[in-house]
Image: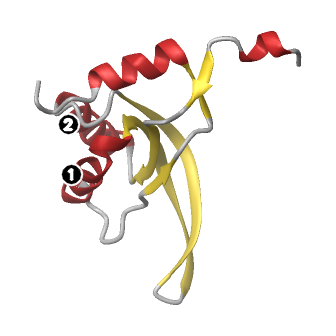
């Protein structure tokens, strides 16, 4: 890959990805819609068809789930996480915040514009 592959990419000072799972597509979409409508994330990608294998209360289990990827900015992460926990049906929801190293500059600007709960 030459340097042209990185044109338009910028260091990610504010963009964050928040990962969670939901028990089904309807629940995932309900949570995603609420967070986007409340401007706590710019976009939520719902990926159905995931299978999670995990240990819960000493027993290894497997469950069908939807993976959800939320795109937001650092200043709203705390509020997004609090709202996600309030909306989520699980006793212990997955909530992992990732900081991308680079993001395409126009996409990063769009995410930033969309995440403004004061609007």
Residue 7, how many percent across, how many down?
A: 69, 11
User: Residue at 54% across / 85% down in the picture?
Assistant: 59
User: Residue at 59% across / 23% down in the picture?
Assistant: 10
Q: Work out whether residue 68 can be spotted.
A: no
- Callout in the foreground (1, 2): 1
User: Residue at 50% across / 37% down in the picture?
Assistant: 47
Q: Residue furthest left?
A: 118
Residue 27, how many percent across, how many down?
A: 29, 45
Asked if the residue under mark 2 is in contact with the one under mark 1, i.e. CB atoms within 8 Å, the reply is: yes
Secondary element type, mark 2: helix
User: On the image, numbered disc 1 is attached to which residue?
Assistant: 83
Q: In the image, is residue 111 above or below residue 91?
A: above
Count neighbours of disc 2 (C-alpha within 10 A) and say few if under 14, some if 14 to 19, many if 20 or more. some
- In this rendering, would 30 be left or right of 63? left
* Nearer to the camera, 45 or 27: 45
The disc placed on residue 34 is: 2
- In this rendering, would 76 be left or right of 21? left
């Amino acid at each position: 890959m030459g340097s042209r592959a990185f044109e338009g990419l910028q260091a990610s000072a504010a963009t964050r990805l928040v990962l969670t799972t939901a028990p089904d597509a309807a629940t995932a979409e309900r949570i995603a819609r609420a967070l986007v409508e409340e401007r706590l994330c710019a976009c939520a990608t719902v990926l159905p068809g995931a299978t999670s294998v995990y240990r819960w209360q000493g027993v290894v289990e497997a469950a069908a789930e939807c993976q959800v990827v939320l795109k937001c900015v650092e200043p709203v992460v705390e509020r997004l996480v609090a709202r996600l926990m309030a909306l989520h049906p699980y006793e212990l929801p997955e909530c992992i915040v990732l900081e991308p190293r680079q993001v395409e500059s126009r996409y990063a600007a769009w995410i930033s514009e969309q995440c403004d709960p004061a609007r």
